[in-house]
Every structure is written in structure tokens, then in C-alpha cells.
Image: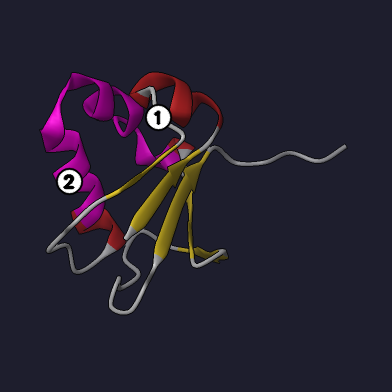
Amino acid sequence: MDVLYFAWVRERIGLPREQIETSAVTVADLVAELRAREERYAAAFEDTSALRVALDQELADFDAPLAGVREVAFFPPMTGG
């Protein structure tokens, strides 16, 4: 699955995207796997209330299932003006 990182998430992790193999069932499970990888992921996912997630370019919740998902994107909330 492709995992994309935007804004400060990308800055903390140091990558715009990566392809990963995961056994995660939900987005929250994936976040737990990523946090456990190393310090930069732990810092990026320290406060998930400050993050939004999209599955295959559709906004989703952290309890959303990953079955059949090809792309997960993490980004901070957007503000309009």
C-alpha cells in the first residue's frame, strides 16, 4: 500500500511517500505500526487528533478498515479562507 505524508507530517518523517507491507486492520493499527518503527514516526503520529486521514482519496476516520485500500494519506486539518 502507498502511504503519503503531507505538510509537517512529511517534514517530521522526512519522506513524501513510501510503499509499505502491513498487517494492520484499521488506520489506527497502521499508525501504531508506524509509530513503533522509529523516533521520527513516533513524533509525526504523537497526536492523532491533529491529523486527518484519507483512504484512496476519501476522508476517513482512524477506525476505518484498510481492507482493499491502495493509498493512505496523512495530513493536518485544512483551513480555508
Question: Measured from the top left, where is residue 79 in percent x and y?
Answer: 73, 38
- Pick whichever, 43 or 73, lies toward us: 73
Badge 1 element: loop
- The stretch in magenta equals 30-49
Q: Is residue 27 above or below residue 12?
A: below
Q: Residue at x 13, y 33 (%)?
A: 37
Q: Quadrant of the C terminus?
A: top right
Residue 34, above or below 29: above
Residue 51 x/y as whole percent:
46, 41
Q: Quadrant of residue 41?
A: top left
Q: Nearer the viewer, residue 6 or 63?
A: 6
Q: Nearer the viewer, residue 21 or 54?
A: 21
The residue under the point 30% across, 70% down is 66
Rounded to the nearest angstrom, the CA distance separating label 1 from label 2 is 18 Å
| Amino acid at circle 1 | Leu
What secondary structure prevails in the magenta region?
Answer: helix
**Counting other residues with Cα less than 10 Å from the Cα at mark 2, is it few (<14), some (14-19), or many (20 or more)?**
some
Residue lying at the far bottom of the rendered structure: 68
Quick check: 3 above or below 58? above
Q: Which residue is mark 2?
A: 32
Residue extending furthest toward the right = 81
Question: What's the mark number on residue 15?
Answer: 1
